[in-house]
Amino acid sequence: MQDLNFLLYAAPGHQTCALAWQKQLSDLNVHTQIEWVDEINARFLRFHPELGLIVDEHGLWLAANGMKMQPAWQAEIPRLKRASPKNELIARACQVNKVETILDATAGLGHDGLLLAWLGAKVTLLERHPVLFALLLSALEQAKQDPLLSDVAQRIELLHVDAEHYLDLADIASDQYDVIYLDPMFPARDANQKQEKKQAQVKKQMQLLHTLLPVDGVMDLGENLLKQARLKCSRVIVKRPKHAVFLADQVPQHQWQGDACRFDGYFQI
Ligand SMILES: C[S@@+](CC[C@H](N)C(=O)[O-])C[C@H]1O[C@@H](n2cnc3c(N)ncnc32)[C@H](O)[C@@H]1O
């Protein structure tokens, strides 16, 4: 992936943090120029609509189009508290009450991985985009300090790697993970959709994610990942928008249907 350049806005009192993030981002080939800002509020964001990064007391944020966003792990707590292996489709699809280890090969904001870890699984998150990875790192650090999330955070491992390379590694044994979970990018409005349904408004966070991705101008829809995952795991679960075509045109053995999305299951027979 090419080197990226960002402005890094730092709020007062966060100089040390901003410098630490600048170093961490530079190690990920994300080059930043720090701008010290008196107050980062809604007005500031409106007047700085270009893509940028922010450091404040809540860690690292991505900003664009007058909004800022970070993996909302703390905001997920009410949902996590209601979640059970039975009432969450993703948990049923991943059999979270029966398995130990899950590889979430397309981490994104980490919300799905966090839920699976909350329900007891040891989850490895893979994210290849350096900025997304840094945002996840920040979310994981914050979670470790949160009394409600600290135990869950201990069950989450985060790796900055392309899942295609990772799954290719010879030392990733075929029984290393009980489940491989895939939620690859999906175009905001997808020409592949079988049914021309009016799409629900993509969540604001997802809109920002789409601003960040793709970096190279071409959105990778994860077609190769399914084949590789199936070679390494006997249970692969793919999240898809409800009416989307199958990933890589592969027909799943089972489907779990939700209101907005579905989970396609691929099992070794
Ligand atoms: C739709 S988002 C996943 C959202 C996630 N399930 C959540 O709960 O937030 C897809 C993410 O997968 C990442 N991704 C796609 N292909 C990847 C690959 N080959 N290796 C690692 N990450 C990948 C993208 O960078 C993006 O952040």
Image (cartoon, rainbow, N blue to C red):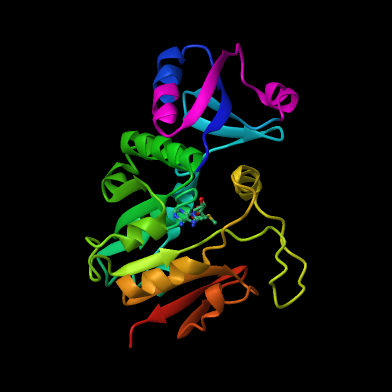
Report the residue at 66% width, 34% height from top.
64
Q: Tell which of 168 and 70 is nearer to you.
A: 168
Residue 110, position as x, y percentages in the image: 44, 50
- Image x and y of residue 130, in percent: 46, 40
Of all residues, the one furthest to the bottom in this rendering is 269
Q: Residue at x 46, y 19 (%)?
A: 18
Tell me residue 147's x, y (percent). 32, 38
Q: Quadrant of residue 228?
A: bottom left
Residue 45 is a magenta residue: yes
Q: Up-down: is 71 above or below 221?
A: above
Q: In the rendered image, which quarter contains the C terminus?
A: bottom left
Relative to 235, say whether 202 is above or below. Answer: above
* For residue 24, side relative to residue 67 (left or right): left
Is residue 240 magenta-colored? no
Find residue 244 and report its image quarter: bottom right
The span picked out in magenta is: 22-49
Q: Is residue 7 above or below residue 3?
A: above
Where, by quadrant of the figure, is residue 68 drawn?
Answer: top right
For the point 32% across and 56% down, the residue is 123
